[in-house]
Image: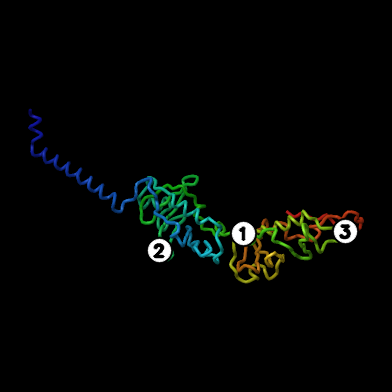
């Protein structure tokens, strides 16, 4: 038949051979590309990460400010960029676990323009996370950018061009010190407090109750109010740390409140000064740091007087109870 003869024509044979050669080359290049420099397939682990090998975490924001730096020490993680204050227990470990569980997703885009548009370029990003070993060698570098939804971030591992949609939030990669520091450095078990003294008053533990010094005649210690005071002082919190600076810079040379604590294990002296922005600075003689507290942290401690910790004694005369009713401690 004629069509069989046409198939044996030199032009047809040449075209068929050329097509077969193209298919063979595509197969060879495809197999070779899967093993040399190509990203792992979707669903594979994003990072080959050993959490124990990580000794330093650096998180930079979109501006030119210094990155937040966390370092592993003998006693745990500290905030190296803020006077080596301890980090909240377990917070770095949770971050490393989250990163270790990340899986590759299908690329959203790969062009240079897309990297800038999604804010995951080397010089345009919302966060740049670097995990390094003890010698400072980077183990992981991740650029995080815009968020397309709840707990989702566009991100890109350094050295790659693919923009990924990962189950992360910017809060996981916060570059704010107050989101990392241990806010319990001032806390103490209430049972450890045996006495507290302020301006014109002092409470001291007496068996199962408390004695009060400084109250108006005819008034006696209000055990419930004093218990509330002790719990407030024992659980005193703060927002973040301030640069040590000079005492006058934080109002500590003219304190608005001083507290002396007697504990079963020693003593503490708190000096509290007013900051210009409405917050307060606190320095304790048992720590090298200066703490920033809000008005909420201090509660009613600023205006506390001895009579706020009292009740009228039974049988007291009217003259002894003429003073105004004391405010209640939160």
The mark that comes first in sequence, 1 or 2, is 2
| Separation of marks 1 and 2 at Cα, in angstroms | 32 Å
With 162 as the anchor, is 208 left or right in this view?
right
Q: Secondary structure at mark 2?
A: loop
Q: Report x, y in % for residue 249.
A: 63, 69
Looking at the image, residue 265 lies above or below residue 17: below
Q: Quadrant of residue 260?
A: bottom right
Q: Secondary structure at mark 1?
A: loop
Q: How many numbered marks does the figure carry?
A: 3
Q: Residue at x 65, y 69 (%)?
A: 285
Colour theme: rainbow
Q: Which circle marks residue 218 in the picture?
A: 3
Residue 256 appears anywhere in the view: no
Q: Say whether marks 1 and 3 touch (CB < 8 Å).
A: no
Q: Nearer the viewer, residue 27 or 116?
A: 27
Q: Which circle marks residue 184 in the picture?
A: 1
């Amino acid at each position: 038949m004629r069509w069989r003869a046409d198939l044996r024509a030199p032009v047809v044979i040449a075209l068929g051979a050329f097509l077969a050669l193209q298919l063979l080359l595509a197969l060879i290049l495809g197999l070779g590309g899967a093993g040399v420099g190509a990203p792992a397939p979707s669903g594979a682990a994003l990072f080959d990460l050993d959490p124990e090998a990580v000794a330093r975490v650096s998180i930079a924001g979109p501006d030119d400010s210094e990155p937040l730096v966390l370092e592993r020490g003998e006693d745990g993680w500290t905030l190296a960029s803020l006077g080596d204050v301890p980090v909240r227990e377990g917070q770095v470990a949770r971050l490393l676990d989250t990163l270790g569980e990340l899986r590759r997703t299908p690329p959203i885009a790969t062009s240079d323009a897309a990297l800038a548009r999604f804010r995951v370029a080397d010089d345009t990003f919302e966060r740049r996370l670097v995990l390094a070993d003890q010698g400072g060698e980077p183990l992981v570098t991740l650029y995080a950018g815009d968020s397309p939804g709840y707990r989702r971030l566009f991100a890109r591992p350094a050295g790659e061009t693919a923009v990924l949609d990962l189950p992360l939030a910017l809060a996981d990669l916060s570059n704010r010190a107050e989101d990392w520091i241990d806010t319990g450095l001032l806390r103490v078990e209430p049972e450890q407090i045996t006495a507290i003294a302020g301006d014109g008053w002092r409470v001291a533990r007496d068996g199962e109750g408390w004695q009060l010094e400084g109250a108006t005649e005819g008034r006696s210690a209000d055990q419930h109010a004093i218990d509330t005071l002790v719990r407030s002082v024992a659980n005193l919190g703060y927002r973040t740390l301030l640069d040590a600076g000079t005492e006058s810079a934080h109002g500590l040379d003219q304190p608005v409140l001083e507290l002396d604590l007697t504990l079963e294990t020693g003593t503490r002296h708190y000096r509290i000064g007013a900051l210009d922005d409405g917050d307060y600075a606190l320095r304790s003689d048992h720590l090298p740091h200066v703490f920033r507290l809000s008005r909420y942290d201090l509660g009613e401690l600023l205006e506390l007087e001895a009579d706020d910790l009292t009740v009228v004694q039974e049988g007291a005369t009217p003259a002894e109870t003429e003073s105004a009713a004391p405010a209640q401690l939160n």
